[in-house]
Image (cartoon, grey):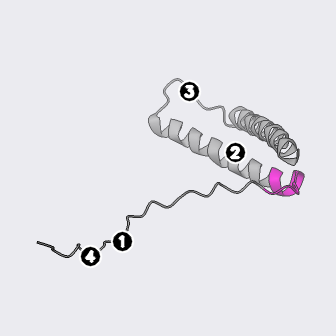
Amino acid sequence: MPLIKDAINRVIRTLLQQLAVVIQEALLYLVAQPDLTDIEPWQVALAIAVHAALSMTTAFLHRTVVDPSKIPSVPPPNTPTFRERPLEPPAPFQP
């Protein structure tokens, strides 16, 4: 049951974080009022970078300040290592 509560908490947290990012971007758009008629590729890249930075900052602040959940994140599963088998000496020659 704690995993279900953690999953629901993560869904709500992600929704609130993205809502905060959209509000921040809307305010940034209202303040800057960029001209979007002749948008350049570097401006698109900058907008993506700003969105990513705002998302990460919002997620960090929300996780550390607003909702410091006591449930730890589930560790990733143990993945097997894919190593080659060590070389074996050749079988002795038998005529």
* Disc 3 residue crowd, few under 14, some 14–19, many 20+, Cα 10 Å: few
Q: How far apart are the alpha carbons under marks 2 and 4?
A: 56 Å
Q: CA distance from mark 1 to mark 3?
A: 60 Å
Mark 1 Cα-neighbour bin, 10 Å: few <14, some 14–19, many ≥20: few
Frontmost of labels 2 and 4 is: 4
Please tell me whether mark 4 or mark 3 is closer to you in this view: 4
> Marks 2 and 4: CB-CB under 8 Å?
no
Q: Quadrant of the N terminus?
A: top right
User: Which label belongs to residue 86?
Assistant: 1
Residue 68 location, quadrant: bottom right
Question: Would residue 48 be found to the left or right of residue 63 on screen?
Answer: left
Stretch in magenta: 62-72
Q: Which residue is mark 4?
A: 89
Marked residue nearer the N-terminal end (2 or 4) = 2
Q: Residue at x 81, y 53 (%)?
A: 63
Q: Amino acid at mark 3?
A: Leu
Give the amino acid type for the residue marked by disc 1 in the picture.
Pro
The label on residue 55 is 2
Comparing labels 3 and 2, the label whose residue is closer to the camera: 2
Gap in angstroms between the C-alphas marked 4 and 3: 69 Å
Q: Residue 28: x and y, percent?
A: 71, 38
Q: Earlier in the sequence, mark 1 or mark 2?
A: 2
Residue 44: x and y in percent read 52, 36
Task: Provide the secondary structure element on which disc 4 rests.
Answer: loop
Three-letter code, disc 4: Pro
